Amino acid sequence: MSAPSAIGMPSEPDTNGPSEKAVAEFAKLASDGRIRAAMAALERNGISCLLVDSGAEARTAVRSMLPIGAEVFNNTSRTLEVIGVAEDVERSGHYQPLRPRLYQMDREMQGREMRQLAASPDFVVGSVHAVTEDGSPLIASASGSQLGPLASGAGHVILVIGGQKIVPDLTTALRRIQQYCLPLEGRRAREAYSVPSGVNNILVINRVITPGRITAVLVRESLGF
């Protein structure tokens, strides 16, 4: 996921994981009242919301929102992996999954086609790294490739959000990304790809102009980073 020094982002994550202090602050499930307040704020900002009790219910909700045969890109997400949505998209046979298709293409010979496919899918399913209490989701990325579709390229966006990701404000959201998400994602990236991660790009969604384009599934459970 490296970002401007003004927000204090390190160039590389701590491979030992987040500190005990960061875990205590950012891994704790928010109260039901805070979750509902964040949900109301998201809806005021044009993001449709659904509140569920568990990852299993979130998986069912995502299935109900994805039409059979739909073209779907599932962003790399620990949340989607844990609850089974990534498997549903890529292996159920119910959809046209773009991620496996892109893996099979030749980046040198088909680079332009790959960029076009990834930039404007019918549906994107992903998660976020933080949601402020006034209803702004934040998503950090090393490459930035998934941020364009989330911001405007995809026809529809579904975001599954664990209840531990709600924070008071933007400053705290940026600290959550730096101090909690980046060390965890950095460790995952080194194990999976043998490369570090970095906060090279951050998308902040303050308001959605197109009604119904983005749906947030909030979960009364700690999920993902």
Image (cartoon, grey):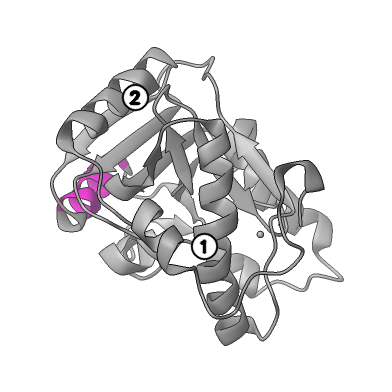
Query: Is the residue marked by circle 2 packed among few (<14), some (14-19), or many (20+) residues within 10 Å?
Result: some
Toward which corner of the image does residue 105 lie, by quadrant? bottom right
Q: What residue sits right under mark 2 in the picture?
A: 48
**Which secondary structure, mark 1?**
loop
Of marks 2 and 1, which one's residue comes earlier in the chain?
2
Q: Which residue is drawn at 58% across and 63% down?
A: 182
Judge left or right: residue 30 versus residue 130. Answer: left
Q: What residue type is labelled 2?
A: Ser
Q: Which residue is drawn at 76% across and 57% down?
A: 2
Viewer-proximal residue among 10 and 95: 10
Q: Is residue 5 magenta?
A: no
Q: What residue sits right under mark 1 in the picture?
A: 76
Judge left or right: residue 6 versus residue 120. Answer: right
Viewer-proximal residue among 198 and 127: 198
Give above or below for 34 relative to 56: above
Query: Is the residue marked by circle 1 packed among few (<14), some (14-19), or many (20+) residues within 10 Å?
Result: some
Looking at the rendering, in which quadrant would you find the N terminus? bottom right
**Which secondary structure, mark 2?**
strand
Tell me where residue 197 appears, x and y as whole percent.
67, 69
State whether the magenta stretch is mostly helix, strand or loop.
helix
Q: Does the magenta stretch include residue 59?
A: yes
Tell me where residue 12 appears, x and y as whole percent.
72, 69
Q: Residue at x 39, y 62 (%)?
A: 23
Looking at the rendering, in which quadrant would you find the C terminus? bottom left
Res 133 label: none
Viewer-proximal residue among 3 and 50: 3
Number of residue marks: 2
Q: What segment is highlighted magenta in the picture?
A: 57-65
Viewer-proximal residue among 95 and 33: 33
Toward which corner of the image does residue 213 lie, by quadrant? top left
Q: What residue type is labelled 1?
A: Thr
